[in-house]
């Protein structure tokens, strides 16, 4: 008999018919009630065993995380908490799970930190299955938004010779032997002998390649893994993370901000509609977690209120210069509560400053724009008529409550001469980026784009607080298990 998914049994199937369900045991109570979950929903289906007619041997094998198949009649449930249940007539143990050895003992409320060490099994818990279903829905919504708005999906390379961000935080890709690397006449590693005949690395961003595609297809987006060898051991950084990078020909920075805001609202709205049960569960989880915190540290809004707040409000657009004024005059700056005190225009903003602006000052998502040129990447459009020494670029960062920077983007420098001058000053070799510069040589035009860190979005939508808990197998400094 074909088995029916638990989600369908709970929602769509007529009662009083014979059904089969397959899944993993979440709990087994009184030798009678199995809570069965198959991953299709946060909800379990209750399976009622006729224990008098079930061999003792079988009952013993109904343990947490055992895989089972049950057949029986779907009845309206007498107990509270569920609408239907299966009155079991036949049970088959598909795969045993030794209760003594199973690492996740739910009774002991395992911590998120502990569960990270069991990343292959943690997805069998309510919290992680909910997070991963939400993550999947969000990625569908990403594609849906762009596909429905005339964007083309472009797969930019994972292995590349360029450092798109110019920050030098790259993982090398090589097939050269470590102990006997071939050397050239100057004694330097001879990359001509390497697999690709040149120095290569894992991509930090698909932007530069995406720009070349935008200059032909008009509107494109990437959605793929990116890698950063930055030694940031924080709850917001991964060494391997997924980034979404749209790039649009003829868009200026204002249109870029409009796109980012509309896009984020769409994916959140879609996920609110599709993941009602999971988000409700995550909201309750968060409330529960916050009970242990002092009142002042608890969020003012519940998870669903926070998500709806994003949909109902415009993001506040603030220039870097205005933001610096606000920060300079802020209480934590004056009382020296910030780790980095803001003294003057030109300072790079730390996450403490970004969070102050979003969480304390504006209390809504903020788009900061027009940053000082020398704290941003080489490809950003230089603003005209700025004072010497106070040059700004058409950059924008979107800051979210509880997250800080979720999006980084800009209008791109489309003028060949200005771009070449900038690269020269930063020591970026023209020969390295000849293909990128060709877009400025042949039919250049105003264009813009941004990058959204997918895991930071998943963090925000699920209300989780550590980025390691929203990607299946996190890669961070000193950790690449699984
Ligand atoms: O601000 P970033 O470095 O911008 C770029 O890479 C541009 N090339 C994007 C573009 O304009 N096409 O990164 C973009 C976003 C950040 O705002 C953040 O959300 C995320 O990527 N991000 C990270 N997420 C997790 N772990 C890390 N180590 C991250 N670094 C950046
Ligand atoms: Mg950034």
Image (spheres, rainbow, N blue to C red):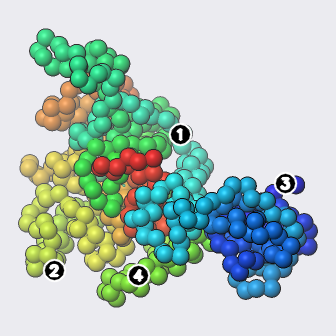
**Comes first in the chain, label 1 or label 3:** 3
Please state the horizontal and vertical placement of residue 24, each as a whole percent of the image.
Answer: 67, 62
Q: Is residue 234 visible?
A: yes
| Tag shown at residue 153 | 1
| Pointer 4 residue | 290
Q: Is residue 33 above or below residue 391?
A: below
* Element under disc 1: strand
Q: Which residue does the image show at 66% across and 61% down from the upper left?
A: 66
In whole angstroms, how far apart are the C-alphas of marks 2 and 4? Answer: 26 Å
| Pointer 3 residue | 2
| Pointer 2 residue | 331
In whole angstroms, how far apart are the C-alphas of marks 4 and 1? Answer: 40 Å
Q: Which residue does the image show at 41% across and 85% down from the upper left?
A: 291
In whole angstroms, how far apart are the C-alphas of marks 1 and 3? Answer: 37 Å
- Quadrant assignment for the N terminus: bottom right
**Comes first in the chain, label 2 or label 1:** 1
**Comes first in the chain, label 4 or label 1:** 1
- Label 3 CB-ligand 1 distance < 8 A: no
């Amino acid at each position: 008999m074909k088995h029916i998914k638990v989600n369908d049994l709970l929602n769509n199937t007529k009662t009083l018919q014979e059904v089969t369900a397959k899944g993993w045991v979440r709990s087994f109570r009184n030798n009678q009630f199995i809570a069965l979950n198959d991953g299709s929903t946060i909800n379990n289906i209750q399976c009622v065993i006729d224990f008098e007619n079930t061999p003792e041997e079988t009952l013993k094998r109904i343990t947490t995380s055992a895989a089972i198949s049950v057949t029986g009649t779907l009845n309206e449930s007498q107990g509270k908490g569920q609408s239907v249940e299966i009155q079991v007539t036949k049970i088959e143990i598909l795969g045993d799970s030794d209760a003594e050895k199973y690492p996740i003992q739910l009774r002991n409320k395992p911590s998120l930190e502990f569960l990270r060490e069991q990343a292959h099994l943690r997805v069998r818990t309510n919290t992680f299955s909910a997070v991963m279903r939400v993550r999947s829905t969000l990625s569908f919504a990403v594609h849906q938004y762009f596909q429905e708005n005339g964007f083309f999906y472009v797969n930019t390379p994972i292995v590349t010779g360029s450092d798109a961000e110019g920050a030098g935080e790259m993982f090398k890709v090589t097939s050269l032997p470590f102990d006997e690397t071939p050397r050239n006449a100057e004694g330097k590693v001879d990359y001509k002998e390497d697999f690709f005949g040149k120095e290569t690395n894992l991509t930090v961003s698909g932007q530069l390649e995406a720009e070349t595609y935008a200059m032909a297809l008009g509107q494109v987006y990437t959605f793929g893994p990116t890698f950063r060898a930055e030694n940031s051991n924080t709850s917001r950084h991964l060494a391997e993370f997924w980034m979404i990078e749209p790039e649009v020909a003829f868009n200026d920075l204002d249109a870029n901000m409009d796109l980012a805001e509309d896009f984020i609202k769409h994916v959140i709205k879609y996920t609110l509609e599709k993941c009602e049960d999971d988000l409700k569960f995550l909201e309750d989880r968060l409330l529960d977690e916050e009970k242990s915190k002092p009142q002042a540290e608890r969020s003012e809004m519940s998870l669903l209120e926070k998500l709806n707040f994003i949909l109902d409000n415009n993001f506040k657009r603030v220039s870097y210069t205005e933001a610096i004024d606000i920060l300079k005059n802020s209480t934590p700056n004056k009382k020296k509560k910030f780790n980095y005190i803001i003294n003057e225009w030109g300072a790079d903003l730390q996450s403490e400053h970004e969070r102050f602006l979003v969480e304390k000052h504006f209390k809504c998502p903020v788009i900061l724009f027009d940053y000082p040129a020398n704290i941003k990447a080489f490809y950003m459009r230089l603003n005209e008529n700025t004072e010497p020494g106070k040059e700004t670029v058409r950059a924008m960062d979107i800051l979210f409550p509880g997250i800080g920077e979720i999006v980084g983007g800009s209008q791109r420098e489309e003028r060949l001469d200005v771009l070449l001058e900038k690269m020269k000053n930063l020591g970026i070799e023209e020969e390295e980026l000849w293909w990128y510069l060709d877009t400025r040589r042949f039919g250049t035009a105003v264009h813009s784009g941004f990058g959204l860190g997918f895991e930071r979005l998943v963090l925000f939508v699920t209300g989780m607080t550590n980025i390691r808990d929203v990607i299946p197998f996190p890669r961070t400094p000193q950790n690449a298990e699984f």
